[in-house]
Amino acid sequence: MEQAILGGGCFWCVEGAYKRMKGIISALPGYAGGQRPNPTYEEVCSGRTSYAEIVIIEYDPGIISYSTLLEVFFTVHDPTQLNRQGNDVGTQYRSCIMPVNEEQKRIAKESIQSFQDAFANPIVTTIEPALNLIVAELYHHDYYARNPTQGYCQMVVGPKLSKVRKKLAHLYETTD
């Protein structure tokens, strides 16, 4: 198994995009990139901790590649928005890739270049180390699945997940 660490705005959206994908063992919301260990959600949301909301993905590279994970990443969020995703504003919502090895770093750089043509504006996704990586509080785990009628989930998360699952349907397990 291998690990991928990706931040694309609110972790509820990014986490949901990787759920039920073939080859995904787990996708957990978390925080990384800050200096002080163990911040709370409220502290991260303040925008004063340098942490980003990220998702820690455990996957089987024999079933799904890191490049494919990045294809999902660049589909589920807008990597051209600096320190924001829609109305979620602040460095904690930055678009970032946190490679766990040199091969992932190389693939991340190549992916940014190859996906640039799909966007009218420059991609601002950063490649950075996963400093002080921690898993978020339990109430964030599977948030969309547990709260599909919550306002933010209906207006933001649901449409993003529908878009990625429609475009990349072949990557998802069927529920038949």
Image (cartoon, grey):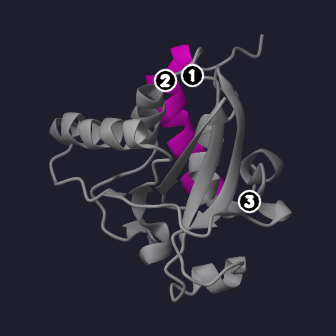
The Cα atoms of the two marked residues, 3 and 1, are separated by: 34 Å
The stretch in magenta equals: 153-171
Q: Which of the two discs, 3 and 1, labels the residue nearer the N terminus?
A: 1
Residue 155 among those drawn in magenta: yes
Tag nearer the camera, 3 or 2: 2
Residue 164 position, x and y percent, is: 49, 33
Q: Which quadrant of the figure contains the C terminus?
A: top right
- Number of labelled discs? 3
Question: Residues at badges 3 and 2 in contact (C-beta under 8 Å)?
Answer: no
Q: Amino acid at mark 3?
A: Gln
Question: Residues at badges 1 and 2 in contact (C-beta under 8 Å)?
Answer: yes
Residue 116 position, x and y percent, is: 19, 42
Give the vertical position of 176 relative to 172 (above or below). Answer: above
- Disc 3 is placed on an element classified as loop
- Disc 1 is placed on an element classified as loop
* Dot label at residue 61: 1
Residue for badge 2: 65
Q: Is residue 89 in view?
A: no
Residue 158 position, x and y percent, is: 60, 45
- Disc 2 is placed on an element classified as loop
Residue for badge 3: 150
Q: Residue at x 37, y 71 (%)?
A: 83
Residue 44 among those drawn in magenta: no
Q: Which quadrant of the figure contains the N terminus?
A: top right
